[in-house]
Image (spheres, helix red, strand yellow):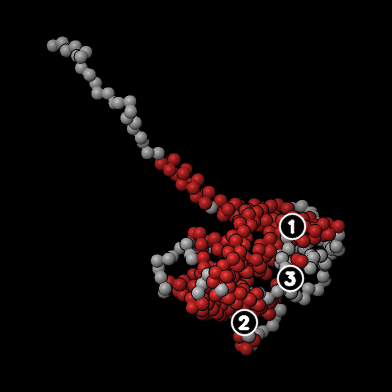
Amino acid sequence: MEPLPPDTNARTPMIPDSTVIRIPNDSNKCKNAVSKWMKKNLLLVLTVLAVLVGIALGFFARMFSYTTDTVTVVAFPGELLMRMLKMLILPLIISSMISGLAQLDAKACGKMGSWALLYYISTTIFAAVLGILLVLAIQPGDPTIKEQSEYRGDSRHVSTLDAFLDLIRNMFPENLLTACFQQVETVFLTNFRGMLIAPMESLIVFCIAFGIIGGQLGEFGAPMVRFFCHIKKKIMRIALIIMWYSPFGIMSLIVGKIMAINDLAKTAEQLGLYMLTVVAGLAIHACVTLPFLYFHRSFNTFASIYSAATLPVTFRCLEENNGVDKRVTRFVLPVGATVNMDGTALYEAVAAIFIAQMNGIYLTAGQVISVR
């Protein structure tokens, strides 16, 4: 039986030209997600890369011979970064506190201030006590490993390079007020006895009083409030520019510090347990003490934990990322950045007892209590 010939009149179903079959492409979604994440966290990525590159360059530079002038030049961009960050502290605290307090009523300000002060005092005490307990338990100070790290090279004298770097340092003063009547000048000391640090408590008290009185003036004090609000916005814009410079400055600091160490093995042996003690204390304080004080209030406002090295970054994290009221941040953050330094309280308590242990000095119970 022969097969039937094909029917030439039969029509095969055709897909209209306008119909487009789209096949989902997971690779494009992944690329878009990565690109979006990179744009949002580019500064973080650059900072991490700067740390890794700085460590690699520091160890590579130790393979060659160099002078202390070379170390100074390498670390100078990092020094400028620290000076620029310190330069913003004073105007940022003044503008934030005055503008924030002026927009709060007296009753809310008093209630918020009381709770903030109670929180600051309690967490600082907890941090100091925790540091003392850890340093007494771990005993990081060993008198047999007492060797200080020094710069490699001979003793230095003020040179033309130091004078030129001082000129640049004066362009980025650590304190805008003292820069009006003081200048930076390099001086090498054989015996270092201490460092003069300007207290911020008097400035905090003045800003609190000024802001509260300005808020009570109503419409008459409104121009003053707007002025300090504009100042704060401009300072935050400058801080953002400095943050983009920070990866290069951090890399410079790391390279300079590694090059300046005389004996890496001895330094690591000397400071390893000390770092372990401080990091353990900070981890316990951040993961146990602070969450205990926080979570009993609310679980709904949980967000990412930001480790801000500067006050401008903290403002941006709370106001832009977490949506915290600006009136609250402008009052609480400047005071907390100056008064509520839990990490400082912890590591200073550890450092004091660590130095005593390194020198073979045994502290009594009363002396340990009087550390903080």
The residue that appears at 71% across and 74% down in the rendered structure is 197
The residue closer to the viewer here, 61 or 320, is 320
Indicate the quadrant containing the N terminus: top left, top right, bottom left or bottom right. Answer: top left
**Which residue: 74% across, 55% down?**
74
SS class, disc 3:
loop
How far apart marks 1 and 2 lie (CA) works out to 34 Å
Question: Would you say residue 265 is visible in this rendering?
Answer: no
Image quarter in which the C terminus is found: bottom right
Query: Disc 1 residue type?
Result: Phe
Q: Locate residue 300 relative to residue 122 in the image: left or right.
A: left
Residue placed furthest toward the front: 220
Closest to the observer, 340 or 223? 223
Q: Is residue 175 left or right of residue 116?
A: right
Circle 1 is placed at which residue position?
76
- State which mark lies toward you, 3 or 1: 1
- Residue highlighted by disc 2: 372
Q: Earlier in the sequence, mark 3 or mark 1?
A: 1
Q: Residue at x 65, y 54 (%)?
A: 245
Above or below, comparing residue 60 to residue 268 in the picture: above
Identify residue type, mark 3.
Answer: Glu
Kindly report the distance in space between the C-alpha atoms of the residues bearing marks 3 and 1: 26 Å
The three-letter amino acid code for the residue at tag 2 is Arg
Q: Earlier in the sequence, mark 2 or mark 3?
A: 3
The quarter holding residue 154 reads: bottom right
Which residue is label 3 attached to? 147
The one of 229 and 146 positioned closer to us in this rendering: 229
Q: Residue at x 73, y 63 (%)?
A: 173
Q: Quadrant of residue 359?
A: bottom right
Q: Nearer the viewer, mark 2 or mark 3?
A: 2
